[in-house]
Amino acid sequence: MKRKFLAALVLIALVTSWGVFANAVTKPEKISVEVITDSTCEFCSVDEAQNKIKSYWPQAVFSRMDYRAKPAQDLIAKYGIKTLPCLLISSKIKNTDAFKDASDNFSEVGDRLLLKTDKAGMFLFLNRPYAASEITYFFDFYDYRTKNTFPLLAEFCKDKKIKLNIKIIVPTIAVPGYPQQEISTALAVAQNYPDKFFDYLNERINFIETLDCTTSAAKMGMDINVILKAISPPLTGKLLADNEVLAKELGITNGNAILVNNRRLFMIMKAKPKDFAKIVNHK
């Protein structure tokens, strides 16, 4: 009887031990991720960034907070956060097998890991001064969206009395030859014929495949000699370099992005004036 009782105790102990082990294997330790975002902005999604982390660590637990809230402000100050969204991850992920394959996606900030901006995205620059009623459009002659976006955005800004700046992006898609002349000619037009600049851009996005840029300028009554002088070396080098400063500073490589009030960055997938209005109203 005593033997049967001891055997039963051993069996219970083994079952209990196996249960603890099984739970440890099937339920990995939770990994906390603090997500700082703008909860009032419908275009400021962090879902894609969260999904990237979730694909490596299904046990990740996310807690979102608005960047204006004090807990978020404390984290921003403590870890020197400069852009949103911000995803701060527990350093526990360094002890996981998945970290070996995903470590390049993170940078260490004190006792946490930060998802890098090229993976998290950017929609708000926290340290840039606010500039009211100002939009900068990163213009790409060769992007199919530009033909629809630019006229609508220019009309919207004119109607709302918003200053519209243009920065021309060197295209990432393959085009015949290097488009330096296309870009430098447009910049020369902006410099010498500012009142015709927007009309010239509209002309080029409609006829870029059938007319060369100097023909378009002549067609619009501009003095070609003035344009050619403006794009002669070394003047063209300065035009191109000045044009690229902001894009390089912000890490922007694609066109059809807009910087609103010098702080908020949005990619335009489909231009809608009602969306422009929503974006501009954010501070």
Image: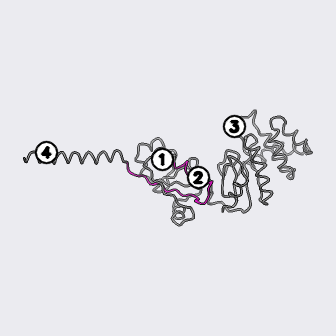
Mark pair 2, 3: CA separation:
26 Å
Mark pair 1, 4: CA separation:
44 Å
* Residue for badge 2: 45
Mark pair 4, 2: CA separation:
58 Å
Residue visible at 71% across and 62% down? 131
* Residue for badge 1: 54
Q: Are marks 4 and 3 in contact (CB under 8 Å)?
A: no
Going by the numbered disc 3, the residue's amino acid type is Ile
Residue 202 point in image, percent of width and height: 82, 45
Q: Is residue 259 magenta?
A: no
* Residue for badge 4: 7
Q: Is residue 29 magenta?
A: yes
Q: Secondary structure at mark 4?
A: helix
Q: In the image, 14: left or right of 38? A: left
Q: Quadrant location of residue 133?
A: bottom right
* Residue for badge 3: 173
Mark closest to the chain's N terminus, 1 or 3: 1
Q: Residue furthest top?
A: 176
Going by the numbered disc 1, the residue's amino acid type is Lys
